[in-house]
Image (cartoon, helix red, strand yellow):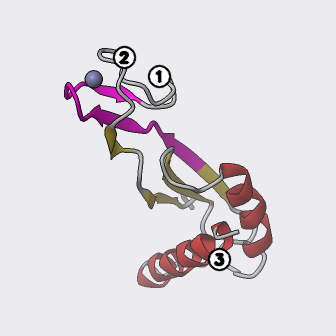
């Protein structure tokens, strides 16, 4: 379950934000997760509820996951298409050969802080 490792990385980055801005806690972390990553959103949510108790600044905060559609570019005809929707097959020429050009990223999109 590498989701926990990822989440500890997220916690470290959020901690920097918290320190740099002199905050005590945050309200939500927004993660952008590409469909083509091996990250399982359910594991992220489960893991977050575990690790958010380990850090004062995360306690009680929410994890928001923005899934990014994986997009492939056909190696035969160059067509770009959403991979899952087309079951990995180019809708124009029927080729399986493609390069994933979008949806391979995992990063922190936003750290939300309640206005006081
Ligand atoms: Zn094609």
Q: Are marks 3 and 2 in contact (CB under 8 Å)?
A: no
Displayed-image quarter of ligand 1: top left
User: Which mark lies nearer to you, 3 or 2?
Assistant: 2
The answer to which of marks 3 and 1 sits earlier in the sequence is: 3
Q: Are marks 2 and 1 in contact (CB under 8 Å)?
A: yes
Under tag 3, what secondary structure? loop
For image coordinates 54% across by 61% down, the residue present is 113
Q: Please name the residue that numbered disc 3 is placed on.
A: 57
Q: CA distance from mark 3 to mark 2?
A: 47 Å
Q: Please name the residue that numbered disc 2 is placed on.
A: 91
Q: Which residues are magenta?
A: 65-82
Q: Are marks 3 and 1 in contact (CB under 8 Å)?
A: no
Q: Is residue 80 magenta?
A: yes
Q: Please name the residue that numbered disc 1 is placed on.
A: 86
Q: Nearer the viewer, residue 110 or 97?
A: 97
Under tag 2, what secondary structure? loop
- Where does the image place residue 5, in percent across and percent down from the top left? 62, 76
**Residue 88 visible from this viewpoint:** yes
The dominant secondary structure in magenta is strand
Q: Nearer the viewer, residue 92 or 12?
A: 92
> Label 1 neighbourhood size at 10 Å, few (<14), some (14-19), many (20+)?
few
Q: Quadrant of residue 115?
A: bottom right
The answer to which of marks 3 and 2 sits earlier in the sequence is: 3
Under tag 1, what secondary structure? loop
Q: Quadrant of residue 48?
A: bottom right
> Label 3 neighbourhood size at 10 Å, few (<14), some (14-19), many (20+)?
some
- Where does the image place residue 34, in percent across and percent down from the top left? 47, 48
Q: Is residue 38 magenta?
A: no
């Amino acid at each position: 379950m590498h989701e926990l490792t990822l989440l500890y990385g997220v916690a470290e980055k959020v901690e920097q934000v918290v320190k740099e801005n002199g905050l005590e806690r945050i309200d939500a972390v927004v993660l952008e997760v590409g469909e083509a990553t091996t990250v399982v959103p359910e594991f992220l949510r489960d893991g977050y509820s575990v690790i958010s108790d380990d850090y004062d600044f995360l306690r009680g905060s929410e994890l928001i996951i923005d899934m990014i559609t994986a997009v492939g570019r056909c190696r035969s005809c160059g067509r770009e298409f959403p991979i899952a929707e087309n079951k990995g097959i180019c809708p124009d020429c029927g080729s399986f050969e493609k390069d994933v050009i979008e949806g391979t990223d995992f990063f922190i999109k936003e750290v939300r802080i309640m206005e006081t």
